Image: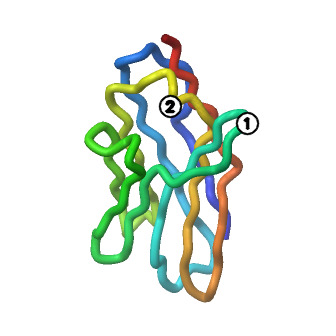
Amino acid sequence: VQLVESGGGLVQAGGSLRLSCAASGSIARINSMGWYRQAPGKQRELVAVIFTGGMTNYGDSVKGRFTISRDNAENTVYLQMNSLKHEDTAVYYCNVLGLPYFDSWGQGTQVTVSS
């Protein structure tokens, strides 16, 4: 299964960005679609995940600012990021779990927030 991410870039603090990730390939079912991020010198951390049925989970640092959504027909997940802070600067990775079993990662997209 291949993932193609888009939407990263440079934005000023307080601004917004929208990331997208489209999955393609041999997909019978998607169980979860999510976003993780990794800043220089730090471990990769959960940003947000959305499960089949629509349940969501967010990292504490982004609650109330970021919104995850998915288009089931297009096997695409979105991350709307508002009120961006300098500390949101990181490489953002898409992750998709599904069947026949796969655990796929995107190539990563850079998000840079200038203070």
Classify residue 98 by image quadrant: bottom right
Picture disc at residue 88 = 2
Picture disc at residue 91 = none
| Residue at image point 58% right, 45% down | 37
Q: Give me the C-alpha separation between circle 1 and circle 2.
A: 14 Å
Q: Earlier in the sequence, mark 1 or mark 2?
A: 1
Tell me whether circle 1 and circle 2 mark residues in contact (CB < 8 Å). no
Provide the secondary structure element on which disc 1 rests.
loop
In this rendering, is residue 31 above or below 19? below
Q: Of 9 and 28, which appears nearest the observer?
A: 9
- Residue 77 as seen in the image, left or right of residue 24: left
Q: Which residue is labeled 1 in the image?
A: 41
- Residue 106 as seen in the image, left or right of residue 45: right
Q: Quadrant of the N terminus?
A: bottom right
Q: Of 5 and 37, which appears nearest the observer?
A: 37
Amino acid type at mark 1: Gly
Counting from the top left corner in percent of width and height, residue 65 is at 30, 37
Amino acid type at mark 2: Asp
Question: In front: mark 1 or mark 2?
Answer: 1
> Mark 2 packing: few (<14 Cα in 10 Å), some, or many (20+)?
many
In this rendering, is residue 66 above or below 96? above
Q: Of 49 and 24, which appears nearest the observer?
A: 49
- Residue 57 as seen in the image, left or right of residue 108: left
| Residue at image point 38% right, 48% down | 60
| Residue at image point 51% right, 54% down | 46
Counting from the top left corner in percent of width and height, residue 8 is at 55, 32
Counting from the top left corner in percent of width and height, residue 84 is at 40, 26
| Residue at image point 41% right, 46% down | 79
> Mark 1 packing: few (<14 Cα in 10 Å), some, or many (20+)?
few
Provide the secondary structure element on which disc 2 rests.
helix
Classify residue 66 by image quadrant: top left
